Structures are given as C-alpha cells and as structure tokens.
Image (cartoon, grey):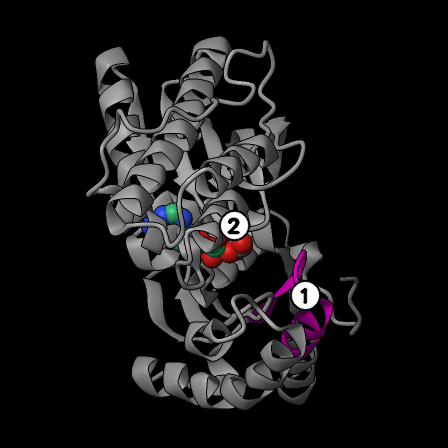
Amino acid sequence: MIVLGVESSCDETGLALYDTQKGLLAHALHSQIAMHQEYGGVVPELASRDHIRRTLPLLEQVFAESGVQREAIDAIAFTQGPGLAGALLVGASFANGLAMALNKPVIGVHHLEGHLLSPLLASNPPSFPFVALLVSGGHTQLMRVDGVGQYTLLGETLDDAAGEAFDKSAKLLGLPYPGGPAISQLAEQGNPDSFQFPRPMMHSKDFQFSFSGLKTAVLTAVKAQPEPLSDTVKADIARGFVDAIVEVLVHKCMKALKETGLQRLVIAGGVGANRQLRNALNTAAARRKYQVFYPELEFCTDNGAMIAFAGAMRLQSDPTLARSEYGFNV
Ligand code: KG4
Ligand code: ZN
C-alpha cells in the first residue's frame, strides 16, 4: 500500500509517500520559520497562505523523486488536527480535492499520532508496547502505547507545553523564534551553578507536568539582572532553564517506565531533538537497563512522512477507516 501524507498544521508544509512494503519513498518539506521570525512567532494568516503556495510544488517533488505514478497511490492521509484552523484547512482541502480527482480514499490523521509513531520510521524501530513521551510546541504527554491506536494517556501538562516553555523562555532572553534550538545551544556555554530554577511537579505522585512557573522563574531572574543582559548571564540562565526542564522530563519518564513495568521508552515531537534531553535520557535509561528510541532528527519536528506513515498504519489495522466521502473535522 502506498500512502501520500500531507502535513500543514502549523508552520511546516510536508508531503511524503510511504510504502508499507518498501518504507519511505520520498518526503519534501518547506519550513516557514524564516518568514515568521521577524514577528517572533507564527502568524496564522501568513502560515495558511504559505501552505497554499507550497503544497503543489512539494507534491510534484515527491512524485518526481520517488518515480511513483499518481494513480499508483492507494490513499491520501492528511493532518486533521490539532493545529491552526486555517493552516489545517489548506492541507485538508488539498488532500480531499486530490483524492476526489484521483478517486482515492482519504484519511484524517491526528497530528499527535503522527508524532507518536514517527520513531517507527527509524532504521531500528521499537516494538510495542512502550512508554512514549510526546514533547512538542503544543503538547506534553506521557503515554502507554500497546499498538497502533492503543494509547493510554498517563499524564500531560496542566499549562504550558515543554516546547512552549522553551520558546517563551528563549524569547525572554531575546533569542529568535523558534527558541528551543537557540536556548539549547546557548545553554551549552552556561554555568550549571549560577541559576537554580524550580523543578515543577517533579515529585508529584502522578504523571502530570506544569511548566508555566518555570517560565515565570526565568522572567524573574531576567528582571533581577542589570540591563542589557550580558552574554554570560544569558548563557547561565539558559543553562539553569534547560537543566530544570530536562530533569523533570527525565524523572517522569523513568517513573512511567518503573510503574508500567515496560522496558522501552520512545521520545517524539520537536523537543525530542534536544541534545541535553537526549543525553540525560540515555544516561538515566542505561543505568536502569531501559532502551530509548528517538525519531530521526528530521522527523522530530513536523513533517509529512509521519502523517503518511500513521495513515498507512491506521489503514493497515482497519481498512474501513479510509473514507470515500469528503469532509473533515478540525
Ligand atoms: O513537534 P513540533 O515541530 O511542532 C508541534 O507540533 O508543536 O515542535 C516544535 C517545538 C518548538 O517549541 C521548538 O522550539 C521545539 O519543538 N524544538 C526544540 C528543539 N528543536 C525544536 N526544543 C528544544 N531543543 C531543540 N533542539
Ligand atoms: Zn507537531
């Protein structure tokens, strides 16, 4: 089965072709980061308009790269939500229009399921069951995953998502959007002993998270410094922030593995690209003989490959999911 995937939930347009026999055949991505950077965040209206501009050329690119004929695809998967309504509408309309023209079924994919299954695209994929930590710009969830479609939510953030905490704290330090990679890089030069930030809910008995207080602690630290902030202070605050958030995430992952009795941990979503988080997780897991799996770096952040893959997995497990009527819910 060959599935075309279309992702357009936020500021990345992603198209991909996934073959259940041969694997990923082609994927193409356009990131709007440069366009949104001058506004310090994603401007929804600009995002929607750019998705319109990019989708067709990227579609042509994946067909040209793979050599697959349009008629040879079996289904079209698109990101149904969650995401920016206008941006989602572009991908959904595009997928439904193409499906109608080619007379192919269409399937709406939950964006988070795309992220969640993306580590299965790697060359050494985990087998079920596993614990998954989903850390993106919009979500932070710990899940027990027993198979495709078999997800049990263990806990999630009560306020800001991990990626949001990275982005907002980075902004307070005057770093460009998206702040995650920037604050992570700056933290490498920081002194770990200069700023001690709180580890919110680290020792709560559940699997919930809370990151808004951490962001406020960064704000308080910034305000207490003489302006303008020196590069050294910026790096030290960045280090204090990254150490705090990483420690909470690692602690809750280890707790989830212990309490579920599972051995495998899967990390997904944009923050999964974070180097400090990966290092700390690898060390903590190795000590307890757990295995950790990550998506390929290019599939941590939004992309079409994960949507094509999740769509294919869903269709394989239940072919009746493919709809031939056209409509969608955001
Ligand atoms: O999964 P994603 O592309 O989009 C959503 O579905 O939200 O995640 C984007 C988030 C942003 O908050 C971005 O700052 C963060 O992932 N991110 C990182 C890194 N790379 C991306 N955060 C920390 N370190 C990184 N290296
Ligand atoms: Zn995402």
Q: Which residues are magenta?
A: 75-91
Compared with 253, 72 (above or below) is: below
Q: Is residue 66 magenta?
A: no
Residue at horizontal 50 percent and vertical 9 percent from the top: 259
**Would the CB of label 1 be found within 8 Å of ligand 1?**
no
Q: Which residue is mark 2?
A: 168
Find residue 320 and report its image quarter: bottom right
Residue at disc 2, secondary structure: helix
Front-lying residue, 239 or 90:
239
- Give the Cα separation between the discs numbered 2 and 1: 19 Å
Q: Residues within 10 Å of mark 2 (few under 14, many from 20)?
A: many
The mark found on residue 234 in the picture is: none
Quarter holding the C terminus? bottom right
Percent x, y of residue 158: 67, 31
Given the image, on which type of amino acid does mark 1 rest? Answer: Leu
Compared with 246, 9 (above or below) is: below
Percent x, y of residue 321: 69, 56
